[in-house]
Image: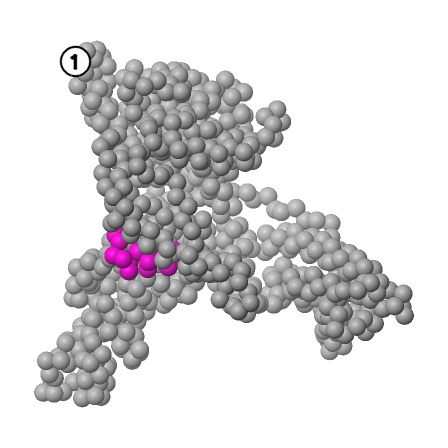
Amino acid sequence: MSGTKQLVDQAARDRIAKDLEATLVVEAAAGTGKTTALVDRVLALLRTGKATLASGSGDLVAVTFTEKAAGEMKLRLRTEIEKARRDKALPEDERARLDHALEQLEAARIGTIHAFCADLLRERPVEAKVDPLFEVAAEDETDRLYDEAFTRWFQETLQRPAKEVPGVSRVLRRATRERDQDGPRTALRRAGRTLLEQRDFPTPYEKPDFQREAEIDRLVTRFRGLAEWAPKGFADNWLTKSLREIERVVFEIDRREDTTGQRDHDAIEAQLRAVQKARWWNWKGSGTWFSKPDNLTRQQVLDVRADVKRELDAVLDTADADLAAKLFVELQGVVRAYEDLKRSAGKLDFLDLLLVTRDLLMTNDAVRAELQRRFGRLLVDEFQDTDPLQADILLLLASDDAAVTDPANARVVPGKLFLVGDPKQSIYRFRRADVSLYEGIKRRLEADGASVLPLQTSFRSAPSLQAFVNAAFEPLMKGGEKATNEPRTQADYVALAPFRPDPVGRPTVVALPVPRPYSDKPGYAKIVQWKIEESLPDAVGAYVDWLVNHSGWKVTERGSETPVAIESKHVCLLFKRLQSFGNDVTRPYVRALESRRIAHVLVGGKSFHEREEVIALRSALSAIEWPDDTLSVYATLHGPFFALTDDALLAFKHVQRHLHPLRKRDEAKLTELTRPVAEALEVLAKLHVARNRHPIADTIARLLETTRAHAGVAIWPAGEQALGNILRVLDMARRFEAGNVTSFRAFVGRLEEDAARGGVNEAPVVEEGTD
């Protein structure tokens, strides 16, 4: 990477490695060598003695986004230290420092911000007011605890009068669409989860000045006025039909009032929300007159209807804000129940690690001062993914004044903070990381003397591909005027600069056409999205097959300039989204690759419970728990674990009159064809009898061991992924049991609930060296 070629950003790279007393914010796009730059700075700090790894004073902390990235950084740092130590001209004092650093490397604070905070809290549990033996709850554990907390709260809330929980009452009155089977309960569950993830913002939502009942009454009056015009128009006019729909809404409101004798504003609000999304608001009809005898033009009716629609939207928007303010208060019971369950289980979730650490630093002067002395340098990778809590922790640790308790007032010690990020990759807003936060901190550090250094040279991409990317994004990504005081919500685009030459004999950008984008409907030969989604996966699979097996194209790999033939490990398929209307977008592509026996690994797929191996394992666990469930027993025997044929199963059923693991069998009537069925049923019977006498994971492991599932699944086209998914079920069982739940049936039920809910990530199997 270094070579003799002068890089356009060489001055910035030199400052990173040499200007150790300056606070630097490095903006580096993917492939520009930012990890190398960060390791170079760490090595320089160690060589000069300006930082140590684990001495207890002036220690270096390197914060990475994932544990995998931390492992890679430690490996790279070890390699660079060893390389530097082999230099015969190295001064003895530097050699001694590097020797000491090598000894301390495994104890170095190089890891995720959550792991760093967990270590600090275990050191100071009394000051932090946490259980000294706390454990970090994994995602599935927090889901289980939250489900239990929400269920408790929901049952208690249903017993309360509606006037005590008006927000919940309004949500429960909302109608449920046919395709949305979850209903209001799920809406409340999601709202509670959102509050749970934002519990570090305790300030209640602002309640608008809103007279809901009066506004709804006014809307009903406006609707009634439109309904009175419905009989005046032509029956086959689309505008008249829309007014008939409004007339039906008014009729339903009046009918309900006649029945109860009073106006139910919660029911009307729920009804109006359904009306708001109706298609008939766009029906316009034709002609000049709507009703000539009444001197009423079509445009007049359209204008009044549009005004009513605007008023409807405005009222419901304000009602939403009013509802949110009420739910904030009423859903606090869910948060309290979750906190109680978590505390009794001795768990902290990922937000707790950040929140408790931040509060500890803000409230305890002695701890804050001691940690500021201990940690002399803070280096942060992927800073664009930092959320407000993480930023507060870093700013307090880097502060030049131990008396400052507010992160907003902290001034950073020059050189103590080194940030690496790419605002263009700020994609984790759902995790509360936001480009405006990044830009705000960057601007604040610049005001305190920090320098912003861009790295532009991309070592990864070919120049023609870089030109393609630059041309696509540079006109669109404009950060806006820097003179304003408000943090920008869009990053400036920094053009990629070339380093290596273009490949010879092949293109770098290929536009793959969609083979069948047109509708099959007669007389409707138009491009439709569903036909694109239907035909594109097979086309992509065929292209990848040609690329890997027939193209003859070559690529260079990392760390080598020698071209090698393209293999499946060189191909990556990226998806804009993983789910569309509840369906896993990746599955058709996976099937297209599997049918061509192209080795692949799926990262982040949302179809965990739809995978063949997971379905088969769920069926087997159901058969173990419920031997009377003939369908599950049959699916298990016929599935991939036992792989018994229909002939054998039918023959056994015909002679023995059952497929029940616990019923007696006539051993004398067993044949070579049916004996494997009896043996498989015996396996299920033994597992059923012992299921509650052994750990849940042990029962699953015995099933896998008896059926030799590991070896069988491993040779599937996507065997690595399938095996990873099976092992993940084992891990889920261990975590489930760690939550003081020992019932095998409860675990099987949880799997079925998770499968019904869907959207679960597949097991991550990508590691260093994975093809």
Residue 312's spot in the image, x, y percent? 72, 58
Magenta stretch, residue numbers: 584-600
Asked whether 595 falls inside the magenta stretch, the response is yes
29 or 349: nearer the eye? 29
The chosen color scheme is one colour
Quarter of the figure that contains the C terminus: top left
Please name the residue shown 20% across and 57% down the image. 714
293 or 55: nearer the eye? 293
| Residue 445 seen anywhere in this rendered image of the structure | yes
Above or below: residue 483 compared with residue 697: above
Asked whether 147 falls inside the magenta stretch, the response is no
Above or below: residue 293 compared with residue 503: below
Please name the residue shown 53% across and 69% down the image. 522
The local secondary structure at tag 1 comes to: loop
Please name the residue shown 48% across and 20% down the image. 450
563 or 89: nearer the eye? 563
Quarter of the figure that contains the N terminus: top left
| Residue 56 seen anywhere in this rendered image of the structure | no
Q: Which residue is mark 1?
A: 88
Type of amino acid at the residue the image marks with label 1: Lys
Q: Is residue 641 left or right of residue 474?
A: left
Residue 5's spot in the image, x, y percent? 32, 19
Above or below: residue 343 compared with residue 383: below
Residue 549's spot in the image, x, y percent? 24, 49
344 or 77: nearer the eye? 77
